[in-house]
Image (cartoon, grey):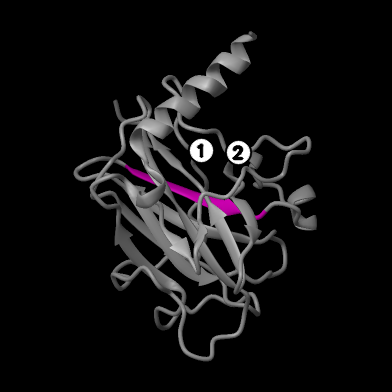
Amino acid sequence: MTDEERRIRRATFLKAGLVTAAAIPAVAGEVLRAPRADAGPLTPTPMCDDGDGPTHEQMEGPYFKPNSPERADLREPGMPGTPLVVSGFVYSISCKPLANVLLDFWQADNAGVYDNTGYTLRGHQFTDAEGRFRLDTIVAGLYPGRTRHIHVKAQAPNQPILTTQLYFPGEPGNNWDQIFDPALLMAIQDGPEGKIATFDFVLNLP
């Protein structure tokens, strides 16, 4: 068995010990732990394993606003766009699930526009006791100069803030966006009412 095979088996064992199937959120009966996407040349989001590096940082960009409302569902009645559910876990670098981590999300709407006067498609939430989160939103629209993405800040209690961005696999813009990072790709599959995505954050904490 190669070192890589041992690492994958160990990562799978660790995650199985932390999560049971009943504990995983679902939409219309479908489990939200999608298989890892984008099996091509791009590096997929790593599973948690002792020794994993922390999730990569990225620039905040010009559209962050503090004091977003606490909510896990950013959608509004009649909002255009493809529904998207993003779920996952927040871990330390030793694979410990982190509870009460603040996750602050913001993104462009279906037309590629950010709400800079209100809080449309902006909101924060906290991971549960097992480090889980779930975000109900829409697929982010495109605007000139960037590929499709969702912004996020992650902060464990009384710890430094991680600022980063999440990306969509298979987007043409991934090939030319100068700050695109394949390590920040979500795993995405089709769901009964839209898209289902997963991403696990690893914070630089023991």
Magenta residues, start to end: 161-168
For label 2, the residue is 183
Q: Position of residue 107 (x, y in %)?
A: 52, 67
Q: Earlier in the sequence, mark 2 or mark 1?
A: 1
Gap between marks 2 and 1, in whole Å? 7 Å
Residue 16 horizontal side relative to residue 67, left or right: right
Q: Quadrant of residue 159?
A: top left
Q: Nearer the viewer, residue 184 or 94?
A: 94
Magenta residue check for 166? yes
Compared to residue 56, the image places residue 139 above or below, namely: below
Q: Residue furthest bottom?
A: 78
Residue visible at 23% across and 50% down in the picture: 100
Q: Quadrant of residue 146?
A: bottom right
Q: Determine whether 78 is above or below 177 in the image.
A: below
Secondary structure under badge 1? loop
Q: Is residue 39 left or right of residue 140?
A: right
Q: Give the class, few, some or many, for how many residues have Cα within 10 Å of label 1's Cα (few <14, many ≥20).
A: some
Three-letter residue code for mark 2: Ala
What secondary structure is the magenta-colored segment mainly? strand
Residue 130 as seen in the image, left or right of residue 197: left
On the image, the x and y values in percent for residue 192 come to: 61, 71
Type of the residue with mark 1: His
Residue at screen point 44% across, 42% down: 201
Category of crowding for the residue at label 2, using alpha-carbon neighbours closer than 10 angstroms: few (below 14), some (14–19), many (at least 20): some
Where does the image place residue 47, in percent across and percent down from the top left? 51, 33
Q: Secondary structure at mark 2?
A: helix
- Please state the horizontal and vertical placement of residue 140, each as a whole percent of the image: 60, 68
Identify the mark at residue 56; answer none if there is no mark: 1
- Which label belongs to residue 72? none
Q: In the visual, does 60 lie left or right of 140? A: left
Please name the residue shown 28% across and 49% down the image. 101
Figure quadrant of the N terminus: top right
